[in-house]
Amino acid sequence: MIRFLPSGFRVRLFLLACSSLIPLPVLAAAYAAYDPQRLLTTTETPAGKKHGLDVAYLDRMLGALASHARNYPPQFDSPQDRQRAVQDVKVLAGMLDALLIGPTPHPELLLRAGLLNGMGHNLDIPGCADKAAAAFGRLLQADPAHARGNLYYGNFLAGSARPRQALPHLEMAAAAGLPEASYSLGMTWLSLGDRQKAIEHLTAYQQRSPSDTAVGRLIEGIRNGKVELKQAGR
């Protein structure tokens, strides 16, 4: 299972006072080269050729894309890297579209399609926002309690300027035991201007993820009024 950092918000973090409170983002590493055609596999069986999808390779591509385009605005080393990522998203989206035809597509494919198109939305690819919402919608219609489906859909909604719609999905993910959902809830409440609830959920995340030392500085900054969250303009 792919695990992305739960900060899928199209927002900018403004440090109002001490700029060293939270490390500012640095340029992303170069976007690695991938060959989407490697996703298609063919296996010889006694009954003939069997075609399939290399999900492990798909997850590698999604992970690489997420390191650059998980949030808005995306961060790339160069315009050429960004253009390659855009092309990869378009090719992958086409492949997944074909696999999602039919009444009961596999839930994990729907989850990946939602993630992919959410990042496509961050890359300003037309139609990706609608496709992400449709994929997550189909997943949660079939399995309303799908923990990661609720987490990623909640992150997508929060990052698409719909924080209040995001809250029920993030709460379901948190109730299902996903610590990163508490982080997402904290950031969503912060974007809504509720510092108390933001601190409450970020503290819950901190208790379950003690290795994430940065969240302590974030909580302290919120308490001191030195951190605010605003929608990032395009």
Image (tube, rainbow, N blue to C red):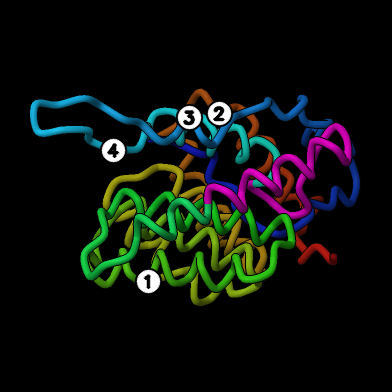
Residue sitting at the far left: 46
Magenta region: which residues? Answer: 70-92
Q: Distance between the residues labelled 2 and 4?
A: 42 Å
Residue 134 seen anywhere in this rendered image of the structure: yes
| Label 3 – label 2 distance at C-alpha | 35 Å
Mark 4 element type: strand
Of helix, strand and loop, which mostly describes the magenta segment?
helix
Label 2 or label 1, whichever comes before in sequence order: 1
Residue 177 placement, left or right of 30: left
Determine whether the residue tagged by mark 2 lies in a helix, strand or loop. loop
Task: Please state which of the two labelled residues, at mark 2 or mark 4, is closer to the viewer.
Answer: 4
Pick whichever of labels 3 and 2 is earlier in the sequence.
3
Above or below, comparing residue 142 to residue 61 in the picture: below
Label disc, if present, on residue 38 of the rendered structure: 3
- Dividing the picture into quadrants, the one containing residue 19 is top right
Residue indicated by mark 2: 212
Screen quadrant of the N terminus: top left
Residue 96: percent from left, percent from top: 43, 53
The residue pinned by badge 4 equals 51
Position of 35 compared to 126: left or right? left
The kind of residue on which mark 2 rests is Asp
Within 10 Å of disc 1 (Cα), the crowding (few <14, some 14-19, many 20+) is some
Q: What is the C-alpha distance between the residues marked 4 and 1?
A: 27 Å
Q: Name the kind of residue labelled 3 in the image.
A: Arg
Q: Marks 3 and 1, Cα distance to the nearest angstrom?
A: 28 Å
| Numbered label attached to residue 137 | 1
Give the alpha-carbon distance from disc 4 to disc 3, as whole Å.
12 Å
